[in-house]
Amino acid sequence: MNNNINLNWANQIANILDSLGIKDICICPGSRNTPLTIAFTNNSNFRCTSHIDERSAAFFALGISKKSKIPSVVISTSGTAVANFFPAIIESNLSRNPLIVITADRPAYLTNTGENQTINQQNIFGTHVRKFQDLDLPSNNEEGIYDKIVSSFNKAIGTSKSPPGPIHINIPFEEPLIKNLSNNQKTVINEISIPKSEKFINDNNINIPNLNDSIIVCGEIKEKDSIDHILKLSEHLNAPILADPTSKIRYSNKHKNIISNYNLFLDRADLNLNIIIRFGRKPTSKLLCNLLNNHKNTLYVDRYPQFNDNTKNTIACDIKYFSKLAIDRTDSNNDNNNLNSLVSLQRKINSLIESIDINHNRCEGVLINNILDTIDTPTNIFIGNSMAIREMDDLTNNINKKINIYCNRGASGIDGLVSTALGISKNSNKSNISILGDLSFYHDMNGLLSTTQMDLNIKFVILNNNGGGIFSKLDIAKLNYDKFEKFWTTPLNLDIKKIADLYNLEYIEIKNHNDLKRLNKKNTKAEIFDYKINIKESIKNKEEILTKVDKILKD
Ligand SMILES: Cc1ncc(C[n+]2csc(CCOP(=O)(O)OP(=O)(O)O)c2C)c(N)n1
C-alpha cells in the first residue's frame, strides 16, 4: 500500500479547491486533520491562517467570504471541534454567504465504540448546510473525489434554486495519519475541465404589476450594482426609498428620495399605498416590518424569494433586471403622494439629526452618526447586533460616502462578531471599522488573538454600556424585578483597556467628538475605541432626541 495515502488524498482535495479559485483557508489545530493541514499549508496558492478557537475560526472564514463572495475554507479535527462551527454555519446559511467546512473524522467503524474524540459527524449540521458530503476512507482510487468536491462547491456558491451558503465535507482518515512529508503522487487536476457552475437566469416573461402609488423598501442588499437601478426606478415611480442601514444605499448615495429615519415617524406618515416593492432581507425597523406584514400588497423581488421569507407576492429575479423591466413596462407615476409625505417628514428632522453630537448628547446612535460624519476614506463598516444596528437605524442620516456595510443579520447572534469583522478586514486595503456592544465584544474575545498573528487593519468601536443595554428597553426593565441586572443586563464590569493590553492593542477612550478623528488615522494594527456610557443616561438622552423629533413634526 502507498505510504502516503492520506496525504495524497488530502493533496487531491486541496488541488481541486485550488483549481476552483479558493484562496483563504482557516485551519484549527488537531491531530486527525494532519494530512489536510499539510496539504493546504504546503500549497503556496492558498493564504492559510491558524486559529485556536473553532467558533471564532468559522466566523473569521465567514467574514472573508462575506467580502470576497468566494467561499473560504475552515478545517478542523474530529469531535467537539466540529460542533463549534455550528453558529457560523447558521449565520452563513441565513445570510446567504458561501462557506466550506472541512472536518477530519475517524473511520466510520469507530463511531459508537467509545474511541477517543469520536462522535457521529454524519449530517451533524442537518438542514443548516446546503450539502453534506462524506468522503470514503483514503485509497488509491481518487476518481470519485473530484465530482463530490465540485458538486459541493457549486452548492456553496449558489445554484439557480438555492442561494450561496455553507457546505460540509467530512473526511475520515485511518492511522497512521502521516508517514512523511513527501507528496509522491502527481495531481491530475489540470487535465480535468472544471464544470461551469449553474447560473441563475432571469425570466423574461415576468409579469410587472401596477406599481403606481408605491414605496420601495430596501433591507440588506449585497449587490452594489443594484443601487443605481433602484434609484432610477424610484425616480421613475416617484417612490420614496426606505433604506435600511445594511442596504448599501443609505450611506453611499445622497438622494432626495432616500428616507433614512422612518423608524422615527413612519406611523405618522399619511400614506396611500397601492403596493410596497421590497428588495433585500427584511429591514431592522419594527415599524417598517409591521407595515410590510400588514399591507395587503407587498411585492418581494429577490433571486430566491422563498428562502427564509414569508412574503406571498414574489418575483424571482435580480433587482437590477426587475428595475430595468419595471421602468420599461410602466408609465412614470408623477403624482405619487407617498414621496411628498415621507420626504417632508424626513426634511423636517434632517437638521436635528445632523446637528446632534456626542459632546451634547451622549448615546449610541449619536455616536454612530458622528462616526459616519467623520469618516473620510473608503471604509468597510461591520455593524454589530443589538443596539448597534437599531440605533444606527434610528439616528443616522442619508450620506454620500464610500462606505461598504456588513453585518451578521442572518440569525442576529452576538457570537462571532469580532471574528467576522476581522475576516472582513483581512486582505483589505480599505479602512475597517467594527461597531459592537461590549457584551458582543466580550463574547468573541478569543477571536482577538488573530490581531496578534496577522496584520489586520481594523478599529473596534465598543458601545460600552456595561452589559446588554438593549434589555433596559424591554418591558421587563420597567417591572423593577430585583434579578433584572443579574439575568438580563449581565454587566461585565470589565476594564476594556485591560483586554486591549492582553492582546497588545492600542486603546483609545472616546470622550468627545474630537477623539473620533483618530478613526481616520491609518494603522496596520487593530485598535480599540472605548465609548463608555451609562445605559440610563443613554436612554434619557435618546428620549430627549425623540421628544425634539415629536415637537418638530407637530410644528
Ligand atoms: C449568541 C447569542 N446569545 C444571546 C443573544 C441574545 N442577546 C441579544 S442582544 C444581547 C445583549 C447584547 O449586549 P451588547 O452586545 O453589549 O449590546 P447592547 O445591547 O448593549 O447594545 C443578548 C445577550 C444573542 N442574540 N446571541
Image (cartoon, rainbow, N blue to C red):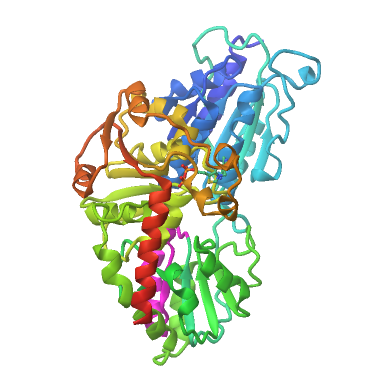
- Drawn side of residue 323 relative to residue 460, left or right: right
Query: Where residue 522 appears, x then y in whole percent?
Result: 20, 39
Query: In the rendered image, which quarter contains the N terminus?
Result: top right
- Drawn side of residue 69 relative to residue 85, left or right: left
Q: Looking at the image, which is closer to me, 334 or 397?
A: 397
Query: Where residue 246 appears, x then y in whole percent?
Result: 43, 58
Q: Looking at the image, which is closer to me, 517 or 531?
A: 531
Q: Residue at x 52, y 71 (%)?
A: 278
Q: Residue at x 32, y 28 (%)?
A: 497
- Drawn side of residue 457 relative to residue 76, left or right: left
Q: Residue at x 23, y 46 (%)?
A: 512
Query: Is any atom of residue 223 visible in this view?
Result: no
Looking at the rendering, the stretch of residues picked out in magenta corresponds to: 220-247
Q: Looking at the image, which is closer to me, 13 or 530?
A: 530
Classified by dominant secondary structure, the portion drawn in magenta counts as: helix
Query: Where residue 109 appears, x then y in whole percent?
Result: 79, 19
Residue 234 lies in the magenta-colored region? yes
- Drawn side of residue 432 relative to residue 223, left or right: left
Q: Looking at the image, which is closer to me, 212 or 1?
A: 212
* Image quadrant in which you'd find residue 274: bottom right
Query: Is any atom of residue 130 visible in this view?
Result: yes
Query: In the rendered image, which quarter contains the C terminus?
Result: bottom left
Query: Where residue 336 appears, x then y in whole percent?
Result: 43, 88
Tell me how many marks there are.
Answer: 0
Q: Residue at x 57, y 77 (%)?
A: 206
